[in-house]
Image: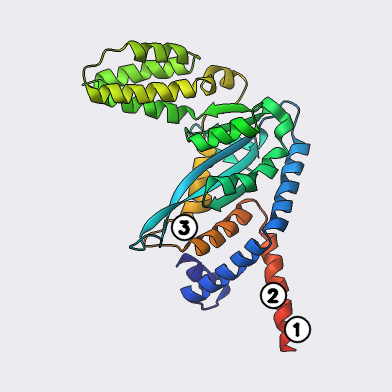
């Protein structure tokens, strides 16, 4: 276990993985017990974020889910979804190179379980930003629960379907429809250009007019058209880019890797739901730059131990 090796290397303290697990669950449980207090801290963070933004700045709110291995199910071998929310300002997003960005400050919230509980936890944070209206930007994939929640609660915000997610749907259709790789490549390239020029209506019309001879193509085309029509108003990518707004959800996808999966999706791991939530809580505290709260908990526990010993 990496943490065991690091403690022994840098602190010269010999511990085992069971001890590390107990300590982690202990402080994870204390964070969970103080979630109302943690929520107040997160609200304060969002309020501070709002106070420092410029009049023309955009605040991004991204939500997505990722799967982690658990001990649930008949064989103790199942997967459950962690829903993760991330809030940040566009001015905190720095371009490192053509393919990599760095976001200096973000506020996170995560929940292992149903989306209704997640949104109940996340809404108070997002509500602080509601009066930004179109300057509050949601970028997400096609999950219906996400868009239903946004439509119901934040109808004035800017809604963007992740550009690359939309392209993936077009690419999946092209693999079934076109027989040659060259035809698929040319057609997809043309559709990308149309997407980046606010021509989603033209794409829909073209797909509707494409002849088909098989039931498989008919079903795939119907599903694609439903997807595109449902998200047409979220696919005005030229307008978004002209307004300096990102059209990709890479920030939340990378957060899944760094906040959740890097710790909870390692080789051979299987989590109890309780244990996974405790670890997720700790990861969110650390990623939101609130780790001093854990240090304070450790100090409080040490003082209590000394008092008892005395």
Q: Earlier in the sequence, mark 3 or mark 1?
A: 3
**Which residue is depicted at the point 62% across and 32% down?**
152
Taking the image as drawn, is residue 106 in sight? no
* Residue annotated with mark 1: 307
Of residues 148 and 18, the one nearer the viewer is 148
**Which residue is depicted at the point 59% across and 57% down?**
281
* Residue annotated with mark 3: 264
Q: How many residues crowd around disc 1 within 10 Å: few (fewer than 14), some, or many (20 or more)?
A: few
Which numbered dot is residue 33? Answer: none
Q: Earlier in the sequence, mark 1 or mark 2?
A: 2
Q: Position of residue 75 (x, y in %)?
A: 33, 63
- Quick check: 225 above or below 43? above
Q: Position of residue 145 (x, y in %)?
A: 52, 37
Q: Residue furthest bottom?
A: 310
74 left or right of 6?
A: left
- Quick check: 288 above or below 157? below
Asked if labels 2 and 1 touch by Cβ distance under 8 angstroms, the answer is no
Image quarter for residue 245?
A: top right
Helix, strand or loop at disc 1? helix
**Which residue is depicted at the point 55% across and 76% down?**
12
Image quarter for residue 63?
A: top right
- Quick check: 172 above or below 194? below
Q: Position of residue 132 (x, y in %)?
A: 72, 30
Which numbered dot is residue 301? Answer: 2
On-image quarter of the C terminus = bottom right
Helix, strand or loop at disc 3? helix
Taking the image as drawn, is residue 127 in sight? yes
Of residues 173 and 295, the one nearer the viewer is 173
Q: Position of residue 198 (x, y in %)?
A: 50, 14
Q: How many residues crowd around disc 3 within 10 Å: few (fewer than 14), some, or many (20 or more)?
A: some
213 left or right of 124?
A: left
């Amino acid at each position: 276990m990496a943490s065991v090796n690091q403690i022994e290397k840098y602190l010269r303290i010999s511990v085992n993985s069971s001890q590390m697990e107990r300590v982690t669950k202990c402080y994870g449980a204390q964070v969970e017990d103080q979630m109302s207090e943690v929520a107040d801290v997160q609200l304060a963070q969002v309020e501070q974020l709002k106070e420092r933004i410029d009049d023309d700045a955009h605040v991004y709110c991204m939500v997505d889910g990722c799967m982690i291995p658990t001990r649930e199910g008949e064989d103790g071998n199942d997967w459950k979804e962690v829903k993760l929310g991330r809030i940040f300002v566009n001015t905190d997003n720095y371009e490192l190179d053509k393919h990599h960005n760095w976001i200096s400050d973000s506020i996170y919230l995560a929940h292992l379980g149903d989306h209704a509980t997640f949104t109940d936890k996340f809404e108070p944070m997002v509500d602080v930003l509601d009066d930004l209206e179109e300057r509050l930007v949601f970028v997400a994939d096609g999950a219906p629960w996400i868009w239903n929640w946004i439509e119901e609660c934040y109808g004035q915000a800017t809604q963007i379907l992740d550009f690359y997610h939309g392209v993936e749907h077009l690419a999946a259709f092209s693999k079934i429809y076109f027989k040659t790789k060259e035809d698929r490549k040319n057609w997809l390239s043309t559709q990308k250009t149309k997407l980046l020029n606010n021509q989603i209506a033209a794409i829909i019309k073209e797909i509707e007019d494409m002849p088909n001879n098989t039931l498989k193509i008919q079903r795939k085309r119907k599903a694609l058209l439903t997807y595109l029509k449902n998200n047409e108003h979220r696919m005005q990518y030229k307008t978004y880019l002209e307004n300096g707004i990102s059209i990709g959800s890479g920030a939340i996808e990378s957060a899944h890797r760094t906040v959740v999966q890097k710790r909870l999706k390692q080789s051979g791991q299987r989590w109890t739901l309780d244990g996974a939530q405790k670890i997720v809580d700790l990861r969110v505290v650390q990623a939101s730059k609130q780790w001093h709260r854990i240090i304070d908990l450790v100090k409080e526990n040490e003082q209590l131990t000394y008092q008892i010993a005395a």
